[in-house]
Image (cartoon, rainbow, N blue to C red):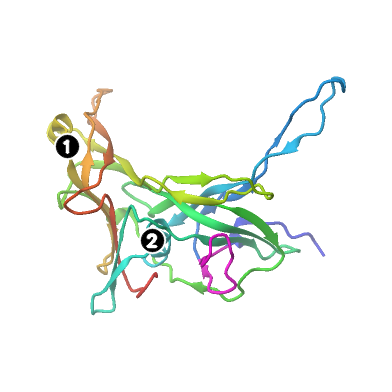
Amino acid sequence: MPKVRAYGADATLKACREMSYGTAPLTGYQSLDFKSTDLSSVIPLDGDPLLGRGRNAQDPYRGLVTDEGQIEIPFDLQGTGFWLTALFGNPVTTDNGDDTYTHVWDSGADHIPSYTIEIGHPKLTTPTFFRHTGARVESLSFDMGQEGPANARLQLVAQGEERFAATVDTDPSAYTLRRFSQGRGFLRRGGAALAGVTEGRLTVSNNLERVRVIRDDGRIEAADPTLASAEGAISVRFDGATLVDEAANGDPVALAYGFSTAQGHELRFDLPRVFLPKPKYALSGPGGVQADFDWRAAFDATERFMLRAHLTNDVSSYA
């Protein structure tokens, strides 16, 4: 029988919320779409040379376990809500009465859920499944452009990885894939479309603390959320007015990044209090002049959030 090699086209990704941190559930997994991942554990080798044994190297020792990496995902109508719940915690969901639901997540929750994530290669001669327990989402980031599909990058921190020859769940649930596109993206200031935008970027982070204690397995004890932060960038065609006044006087502005569909569904990130730096711009030729703003968001005492994510779709619950 010929050897069957691993290919990304055959890979699978399943995830399930944990009831207890680091303990893998036996059922209830969700099959999720992804573009790439480098989530994997590593155990480094290091040396502690002793004298009196000559010049040749001695045995190294094994370091601590680090299980971290990224998953690149599509922004889609249903699956995105799963990851936003992992990032922020449970949403507040409203039934719109027309077979659609609006889910709202706020940054800065005291607790965020942990997950067991399985990355599998089921078509190998000996199927292989890498199971990561105690996985928490540290950050989500995405870029906005003028065309192409809308994708995002998740940074995850897990407690540890184990290898299995069989999948944890042979009958996982699956979302219907309906992707958002850059062609229907928007960036608003104060509720109105921001003119002249050529590019955008947003990153929201839980800034997880890796809790290291003395353990015989070398793994972290936990990954706890600390200060929530949101930052990003906007590139605009310079017109002498757009955002320049706010950047110069230091007044915060309200921004919204998002995507919509022709059917009325929407994914939106609201930031009511964004501070802009005074940008540096340069003339490099006869073409248009561009100004770049690297901004930071802050908590709004009136709105009671720093960042609020909205997703309107046909999923009734992510709790």
Task: Work out whether residue 229 can be spotted.
Answer: yes
- Proximity of marks 2 and 1: CB atoms separated by less than 8 Å: no
In the foreground, 232 or 133? 133
Residue at the limit of the structure toward the front, as seen here: 214
Q: Is residue 17 left or right of residue 300?
A: right
Q: Residue at x 32, y 41 (%)?
A: 232
Which amino acid is tagged 1? Leu
Task: Name the quadrant containing residue 166.
Answer: bottom right
Q: Is residue 193 left or right of residue 171?
A: left
- Image quadrant where one finds the C terminus: bottom left
Task: Work out whether residue 186 can be spotted.
Answer: no
User: Spatial distance from mark 2 to mark 1, Cα to Cα?
Assistant: 33 Å
Q: Is residue 20 magenta?
A: yes
Q: Is residue 258 magenta?
A: no
Rendered position, 96 above or below 138? below
Magenta highlight range: 13-31
Sequence-first disc among 2 and 1:
2
Task: Name the quadrant containing residue 310.
Answer: bottom left
The residue where tag 2 is placed is: 89
In the foreground, 242 or 298? 298
Rendered position, 119 above or below 44? below
Q: Residue at x 62, y 49 (%)?
A: 219
Q: Residue at x 37, y 57 (%)?
A: 88
The location of residue 213, given as percent across then percent down, is: 59, 45
The location of residue 85, given as percent across then percent down, is: 40, 62
Nearer to us: label 2 or label 1: 2
The residue where tag 1 is placed is: 243
Q: Secondary structure at mark 2?
A: loop
**Image mark for residue 213:** none
- Image quadrant where one finds the N terminus: bottom right
Which amino acid is tagged 2? Gly
